[in-house]
Amino acid sequence: MIDFVQNCFDGVMLGSSYALLAIGFTLIFGVMRRLNLSYGPSIMLGAFVGTLVFLEFRAGGLAVAAATVVGAVLVGIYVERLCFWAIRQGAAVASMVSSFAIWMQLEEVVTIAFPDRTYPFPPLTRTEPMDFGPFFFKVENLIMFACAVALTLGLHLLLYRTRFGLRIRAVAENPDAARYMGINIAAVTFLAFACASAIGGIAGYLIVAQDGQITPLFGLWATFKGLIAMMLGGMGSIPGAILGGLLLGVVEAQNIWYLGTEYRDLCAYALLFVFLVFRPGGMFGHTLAERERLALRRV
Amino acid sequence: MLALKSLSKHFGGVRAVDGLDMEVGKGEIFGLIGPNGSGKSTTVNLICGVFPVTAGEIRFEDRDITRAAPHVCLAAGIARTFQNIRLFGHLSVWQNLWVAQNGMADRRTSGFLHRWFAGSGRARADVERLLEFAGLGGKAEELAANLSFGEQRRLELARALAAKPTMLLLDEPAAGMNMEEVAQLRERLMALRDDGKTILLVEHVMELVMGVTDRIAVLNFGQKIAEGTPEEIQNDPLVREAYLGAPQSAGDGHA
């Protein structure tokens, strides 16, 4: 029982990083109704920028974090210009396919620029785990969880308490009406994309710093975890992204403990399969679709 | 104020608007009427920059806005409402107004930081005033999707006003309204004119058009077939023919 509870704690903390990745995905999807497969790889490239700063200048944690986030945002902007802005009149699937092409391109760039594949990444902290009765917590896990909570709260305030956030929501709901109300759609989607990339950059830094190393495969990993967490929660829903991430984390943590590490990804796919069969809209997807139908009927 | 010069819009072989010349004076309520498919809504959409103009020119306050994007037209001072209501249903009533405060009037008179900190108080006061004007005083926190049809129409009008435009384009604001609501709308439009706004009114409800406009232009097949005061239009034989296909009395009831 103690093991189970401990696993739940670990899972929530692991899941908080998945939740951040899923929030980035869902923010882009919510505003543009388009899927950005290059999301993970752009974070991966940002992390390699962080590694570069670490290796070249022996920089401290904060500088590496800043470099990672700035790198992720710059690559994110590159993806936005190429896969979304340039073909905004085209079909949504065109954006998805070209974001897949850019993914391959980004991975190539990294393997050419960093031929050793695996590079060291400075850890968050070297503090010993802390004990609370029968349970123990890794300090870097606690930091990750705290950052995830703070970021989610910040995003909530941005979306629901500022005019910029209101514009994002207006564009997500009715781009046409938003345009005629004088909202500059191009600027709003660009900034929303940049926000999502920044969140992804922070999430990427926290995850990679825990692993202590970075490989080009991190891009694939981040896209998979973020996508699965988003689909569990319901595409376009931020509460869904959070719950989806946490659920994925807890299920993975239980599996690692009871079945072993080799089943970690298998169980993530199994979970997604179960959801796609029994609740294809995700946890919040149905209500979202229903709300949309209602909005279309009434407004 | 607003001048259209031989404005044309062709969709493939269809000449939706065909060489339209029209001028709306400052402070006027200008009616634009015509049978279904005569090009009224297309004209409104052209002025707002919804789709590109085939030929001709649109000038607003001596500025060429022929190829301006929608948000640029709004910044220039032209706001609109829609024939089919297009509110943000998941946002509350006051948020619908707040998000639409994108006009240039405030930007010219105050800096970015000032707007960020001190602007919100004034923005709040503006929203209160608009709620009052639209008769939505008690509904500020309601979701727009939950309002009644008449309330949604009023919110659309208020939302167009939130940007503090100098000119309003109203695309069939009275569609689906009962007699009492039409009378209220008429009062509101009069109040707006007294406030100095210029209004281009596209409408099928003749009680409203004939009762409130200063001048009227009549479109048929994308071309202007008549222009004048409401009295002149009601007695114009071409207009009667376009509406009724026979020489009878025009101007009563729904056309």
Image (cartoon, coloured by chain):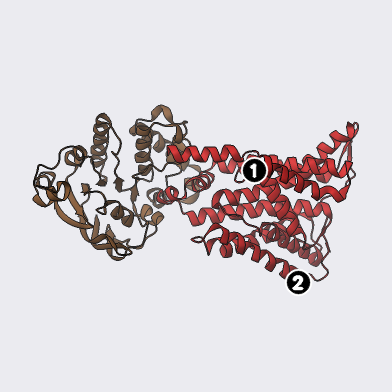
Chain colours: A red, B brown
Quadrant into which the C terminus of chain A falls: top left
Residue A128 lies in what quarter of the image?
A: top right
Judged left or right of residue B151, residue A31 is right
Foreground residue among A165 and B81:
B81
Residue at (62% x, 48% y) in the render: A26
A205 to the left or right of A1: left
Seen in the picture, residue A110 relative to B78 is either above or below; the reply is below
Q: Can residue A150 be seen at all in this image of the molecule?
A: no
Which is nearer the eye, A106 or B222?
Answer: B222
Residue that label 2 marks? A113
Q: Name the residue under label 1.
A: A280
Name the secondary structure under disc 2.
helix
Name the kind of residue labelled 2 in the image.
Ala
Cα separation, mark 1 vs mark 2, equals 40 Å
Position of the N terminus of chain A by quadrant:
top right
**Tag 1: amino acid:** Pro
The answer to whether residue B92 is left or right of residue A233 is: left
Tag 1 and tag 2, C-beta contact below 8 Å: no
Residue A173: x %, y % from top left: 50, 45
Q: Residue at x 40, y 33 (%)?
A: B128
- Label 1 residue SS: loop
Q: Mark 2 lies on which chain?
A: A
Mark 2 residue crowding within 10 angstroms, few (<14) / some (14–19) / many (20+): few
